[in-house]
Amino acid sequence: MRQGIIDVRGAVGETDVWTPHMSIAYSDTDGPAKPYRDALASVTADPVTVTIQRIQLIALGRDEHLYRWESVADLPLGTQSLYPPRRMHGR
C-alpha cells in the first residue's frame, strides 16, 4: 500500500511527530486531563480483531481548528478482484 502511494505521489518524508492511532476524543481547549484519565483507568477491555474491507487515501486539512478531509482514492481489500473476469467469446 505504501509503495503504491509513493508511486503516485512520490516519496514522503518520515516524521517522529505523529504516531498512527485511534482516538476517542479531541479537545481544543486547555483543561485538566485527570477526570478523563480517571474515567479511562476504570475501563478494562480485551483486544479485538477487526476486518478491514477497504482503505481510503485522504487529503487531510486542519484549517480553523477543524479536521477536514476529502477522499482521493478508495481501494477494496481482500480476494475480490479489482477487475471483472474476462468472458471467453465463442465457447
Image (cartoon, rainbow, N blue to C red):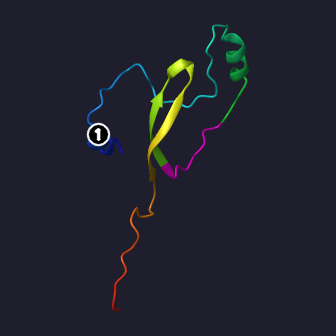
Crowd rating for badge 1 (residues with CA inside 10 Å; few <14, some 14–19, many 20+):
few
Q: Quadrant of residue 14?
A: top left
Count how many numbered circles sit on residues in the image: 1
Does 51 sit left or right of 46 as displayed? left
Magenta residue span: 46-54
Residue 76 place in picture, x, y as percent: 46, 54
Q: Residue at x 29, y 43 (%)?
A: 8
| Residue 30, x across and y down, in percent | 63, 7
Residue beneath the point at 49% across and 38% down: 70
Q: Is residue 46 left or right of residue 63?
A: right
Query: Which quarter of the figure is the N terminus placed in?
Result: top left
Horizontal and vertical percent position of residue 56: 46, 44
Residue 79, placed above or below residue 4: below
Residue 47 shown in magenta: yes
Q: Residue at x 49, y 50 (%)?
A: 54
Mark 1 = which residue? Answer: 6
Based on the picture, tell me whether residue 55 belongs to the magenta stretch: no
Residue that appears at 56% across and 18% down? 65
Q: Amino acid at mark 1?
A: Ile
Residue 85 at x, y percent in the picture: 39, 73
Q: Is residue 80 left or right of residue 6?
A: right
